[in-house]
Amino acid sequence: MADMEALERELVSLVQGNSPENRRKFALQAKSDGRKVIGLLCTYAPEEVIYAAGMLPWRVTGTWDSNLGKATVYRDMDSCRYCTHALEALLRGQMEFLDGVVDSDWDDDRRRVFDTWVYVSKPAFTATFTAPKSKSEIMERYFCREMAQIISSLEDFSGTRITNDRLWQAVKVYNKTRRLLLRLYELRKRAAPPVTGAEVLGIVTASTVMDKADFNNRLERLLPYIESRVLPHTRAEPRIMVSSDMLDNPRFIEIIEGEGCKVVMDDLDTGSRYFHRLVDENADDPVSAIAHRYCWRPADPVGFNWEEQIQQIIEWARDWRCDGVIELYESFSPARRWRAPFLVRELGRAAIPLTRIARGYDAGGAEQIKTRVGAFLEMLAKTPV
Amino acid sequence: MFLDEQVQKLQRRVRNIEQNPRPEFLKCTKLRYQLELERYLHVLEAWKQGKPFAVSDSIDSILQAMGFEAQGYIAWGDRVSNPQKYYDIAINKLGFPDQTCDRTITALGLFLSGEVPIPRLMAARRIPCDPERWSLMAAAKFTGVLFLELARLNNNGDENIRCIADQEAALIEYAEKSVPGIKYDESKLIELMEADQQSLYYLRDTYELRKRVPCPISPQDSFRLMTMPSRYPNPARVVEYSKAYRDEMFERADKGIGGVREEKLRIAWLATGPYGRSTFDLLSKKGVSIPWFHYGRAAHYFGLIRDDLGDEGKYGRKLNPLEEMARFFNTNTWAGPSTDWVDPLIKACRDLKIDAVVDFLQVGCIPTINLKRITAQRLKEELGIPTLDLEGREHFATEAGTINMNKKLEEFIDMCIANKG
Ligand code: SF4
């Protein structure tokens, strides 16, 4: 019994790994171990190469509160809130430990936050790369070359040679993270999942700020306990998939689940899209193998391939037996707004109920989200199975 | 119907110029309108004949070299006379976003209205901006038109040129396989690129003239974008127009004719020209000339970025025609890193003795809105000149909004003139 309580406490601690109080600790620990810490603004950044250089790749999370007084000097309020909250965190001095920042050309606005970042804080190390927006051999070849450039700048910066051996070691660690997270996600297929959607989001985002080897040890230790865990779900609760981008605050999922449903799957770049697809450990060349994984990972709404993105949602919804999909789009996400009519049409054709609800980045506006979720669940309850 | 309306509008404009010539405007503008008119008539005829159309935001020359008729998209949306109609189609009927700029949503509505041809192929790339790309994607995906994308790449250099050229080759192969009668003709592409380059050379000659005080070009003429011969049915005539434009500028400069009656202030205007006559009239009345209109292609067109057809210096080798197109792609400074946008702006402001800058921000324009602070700060730090952020809309400006905007502009102009002494 005592063991169970200790494990539960350990689980809670892991779930809270990316909370405002905790996320810095991992970075500061790495610094005190003599490692450099590199902030990542894009989940397409090939983390393995940074890890192989002996540094800690650390995903940038924005402030979770609503005060944006510093960032709005540089940014319009009607634009991507993740970018604004991330900049706010930087300008408040909450990321003073970062030695560098890496970003991609993910979208026009992210590019601007990177520009401002570099202009204001002049980090010692910066790198940008082309996020693969379509899946083709041409783009993969190019991504490989960009990775080679990043590797060489990292080598210059760190003074460490990033050998193939180091890359393969990093790949093993990262693939292990992916396998463990997949195992966790598989548990959500159960009729009564042993973890909530909010907990899962907490765990995945914790992995983005922790050393992956430490994260792996902790999750591996916890998985047998999670497998045996029983949550007080009622079986009749609808099974929901949440789709969004840059959603890293589990509070949003708690709000949804609080209305009487189980979030059993997600289409998030801080969730399933972050870790799906492994790097081929039997390939000849680690750089090409890593590039291949990032180019062919599940697609994001900013990409060119809307059909594929939506097909992926449909497949996941079927595999995890979701009763409906909630697109919890960030209010100012142009990519999702442009895609919306297409998403509505295609999920309609697949007979998957969908509701689209706007959100901010801090978890304000909870009442509105609750009302909309409540209405959706009510609609699902009336829909004949 | 949109195309007929354009024909009538241009016919009216040509008549107007003939009947009421205005000395402050360039005379060659009449030829420009005639070329536009020819283009719309050509589109109407090609549509009637059932020829295959294609839309792209950047690679018209390649599409034409394959035998497609080039069709406008954003540029056509810019010209509609009843934007509400198209807005209703895109937003109210189909649910596309109302937070984007007027340009992208109106273009989409027009495309879906049935008033323009449905192309066989649409191609977009990651520039000029995301909304433009998404608008094109939405149009294609809603109508089932073949859609192909070319990624603009983040880092410049030889690898970049090769990769874009590979993507272009893949697009050609795909189009040839998918659309009957389509066949890529490389010599045609070279011909079109050469015509474009020739026009560019003429335009560049005028950069020096813009340094003169008074600036020989009127504010309204400053905002007329360069016409690329490759986009017209008769490219040779467009080259003639470019030459006429240059010659006329020289003539005006030699005679000391300014674009405004008494030049009091020299402004660089950013991003998009203002919409509506009242702003031009205000600028003229106040003696404000616009020696520099900074838009995505300006730095290359006017020679601040020298990366031209056939130039072997930059890459240390001769590029093939598709690589040349890629090179051309990359000279666009729009929606890229802030340095791509601000560095040439600073150079132009220094060269052209600019007193102040107006950053014209379209509501919903992502690439500009969150760059404004860096732009203004750098202009202040590096040149000591002030910037006005001016928000405006292309189609849905209210009367009160326009009055407000002009008032803000006027106050800024007055302040700058007073400071200039
Ligand atoms: S106004 Fe801005 S968002 Fe709209 S098409 Fe132009 S660059 Fe794109």
Image (tube, coloured by chain):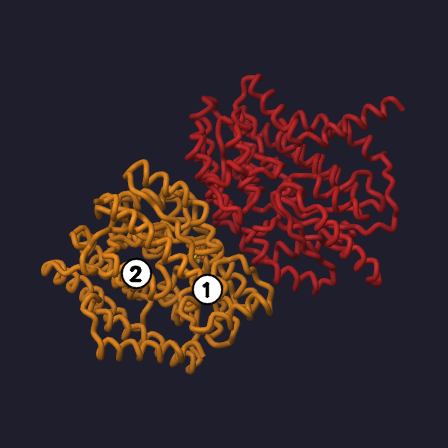
Cα separation, mark 2 vs mark 1, equals 18 Å
Ligand 1 shows up in the quarter that is: bottom left
- Say which mark, if any, is on residue B282: 2
- Chain coloured red in the rendered structure: A
The chain that hosts pointer 1 is: B
B225 displayed left or right of A334: left
Q: Residue furthest left?
A: B255
> Which corner quadrant holds the C terminus of chain A?
bottom right
- Chain coloured orange in the rendered structure: B
Q: Residue furthest bottom?
A: B48
Q: Which residue is mark 1?
A: B398
| Residue shown at 42% from the left, 45% from the top | B371
Report crowding for label 2: few under 14, some 14 to 19, many 20 or more residues within 10 A (C-alpha). some
The chain that hosts pointer 2 is: B
The x, y position of residue A186, in whole percent, is 77, 42
Q: The residue tagged with tag 2: helix, strand or loop?
A: helix
